[in-house]
Image (cartoon, rainbow, N blue to C red):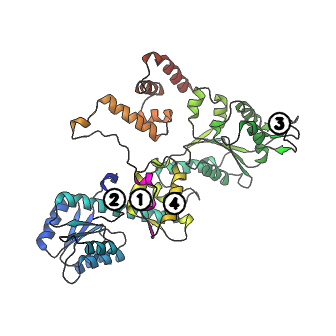
Amino acid sequence: MRQPDAPVAHHETHEVGRARVLVADDDADLCQLLRGILVRAGHDVVTCLTAQEALDRMADSPFDVVLTDWQMAHMDGIELCERVVKEHRGVPVLLMTAHGDRDLVISAIRAGAYDFISKPVEEQLLVPLVARAARARMLDKEVTRLRREVSTVTPIPGIVGTSPAMRRVFDLIMRVSQSDASVLLEGETGTGKELIARAIHARSARAAGPFVALNCAAVPATLLESELFGHARGAFTDAKAPRVGMFVEANGGTLFLDEIGDMPSEIQPKLLRALQERKVRPLGANVEESFDARIITATHRDLEADVAGHRFREDLYYRVNVVTIHVPPLRERGTDVLAMAQHFLRARSDAQRTLSAPVAELLMSYDWPGNARELENCMERALALSRFDQITTDDLPEKVRAHRAERVVIAAEDPSELVAIHELEARYIRRVLKIVGGNKARAARVLGLDRRTLYRKLERLNGAATTDDSHTEQVAHAEESS
């Protein structure tokens, strides 16, 4: 019998190291047997013959897992479990019993037991059970640490993260804020590119000026030019009054052009001229207007590939790409996922809701294709459904609960699972491409290949005929020259 929130084997994505295990049983011989098993598994083990001795030991030093018998004199395992749960929050308790009756199970669950194991204890069941409990304890401590960190460490308010990838982003934000150089933010949808653009603006000498944002993909091409440059009265049928464009509106501040890679090709040369001349001509007007605004752009596309494919102007690309900041996807940010989840919970609830260890493990193993936006939605849903002080796995969306981490398996016991080296290479290339969001330039860097070689390999993986190699060479050469 397992608690509803107990983690299962296929979610064990990280190795658990040495844990401190406290064994409580009034059978001295069994204590020594259990100690031997767990020491061989790499754990530090302390044994006790009474529940009170176990509590005294825990008062003196911390433990990661408690393994206790149900039937002991003076204080049984259920009462010990209740005391541990109350006095040593987050330490999982494993109950050993030779009696599997329903009332005992219900009492143990109510007491907060993590899991059960039947007597006589079998080594092949005990070792992975203790490993899972230790893993749960480790995650609980990590969630607690991150919760404290979220409330005290905020290098940039509103942007949560302490991973190496985000520390690099924070460093670039601080450095680029001191200049007026154009910045290109690259990253998948939902990674928080606008938050970073606002952070750069807030730390710049233009902070007192306006921050004007436009999503180039959300405005029809027929209206985008008017939005950017403005128009004079009578410039077109519905132009009953003059309108100031966003370039002029952002005077003294920052203009943020999101999804610039989706800008229609016919507007790109006009945008380039505006950036070069620092002037715009409203539609239907005879006079140009000057503007003074810092330009920050963002895209989820691989603009280098778009330049090579003649979908984005090369001169415009270099004009907006003076400084590039790559915003990492959530799956590359490690425990930032847990810190952000806790941040979203705190922002939406007055109650101090926390993440249970099994929830933390699921959040860490999920790929988050929607990035921070998807995680925020997930936590909002969890709060709406939660009935307890802790978020449980039942509160998460089905696709998060059912997710299985994708792996490239190299070692295998069954010869039928082994694959040829070209198939292993193919699997790894596909995995890298998925992780970097299809960005072939980044994939090539990760794989240690030049882009021409990667294109040839992709052509073969996709079943292209060798006669197409000349086209591959042309595309790869165009990318390399860009």
The percent position of residue 16, horizontal first and vertical second, equals 30, 56
Q: Secondary structure at mark 1?
A: helix
Q: 301 above or below 45?
A: above
- Between residue 237 and residue 362, name the one nearer to us: 237
Mark 2 or 4, closer to the camera: 4
Q: Amino acid at mark 1?
A: Ala
Identify the amino acid type marked 3.
Leu
Counting residues from the start of the chain, the first of labels 3 and 2 encountered is 2
Q: CA distance from mark 1 to mark 3?
A: 54 Å
Extreme bottom residue here?
74
The residue under label 4 is 381
Foreground: disc 4 or disc 3: 4
Residue closer to the observer: 407 or 166: 407
> Which is more foreground, mark 3 or mark 2?
2
Residue that badge 3 annotates: 283
Q: Residues within 10 Å of mark 1 (few under 14, many from 20)?
A: many
Residue 235 is situated, as x and y percent measured from the top left of the image, at: 86, 37
Residue 396 lies left or right of residue 305; in this view the side is left
Q: Which residues are magenta?
A: 389-404
Mark on residue 360?
A: 1
Q: CA distance from mark 2 to mark 1?
A: 10 Å
Name the amino acid, label 4. Answer: Arg
Q: Which residue is mark 2?
A: 7
Say few, some or many: other residues with alpha carbon within 10 Å of mark 2 (under 14 / 14 to 19 / 20 or more).
many
Against 203, residue 348 (above or below) is below
For the residue carrying disc 3, how many other residues have a C-alpha within 10 Å: few (<14), some (14-19), or many (20+)? many
Q: At numbered mark 3, what does the secondary structure look like: helix, strand or loop? A: loop
Q: What residue is rendered at 31% in x and 40% in y?
A: 409
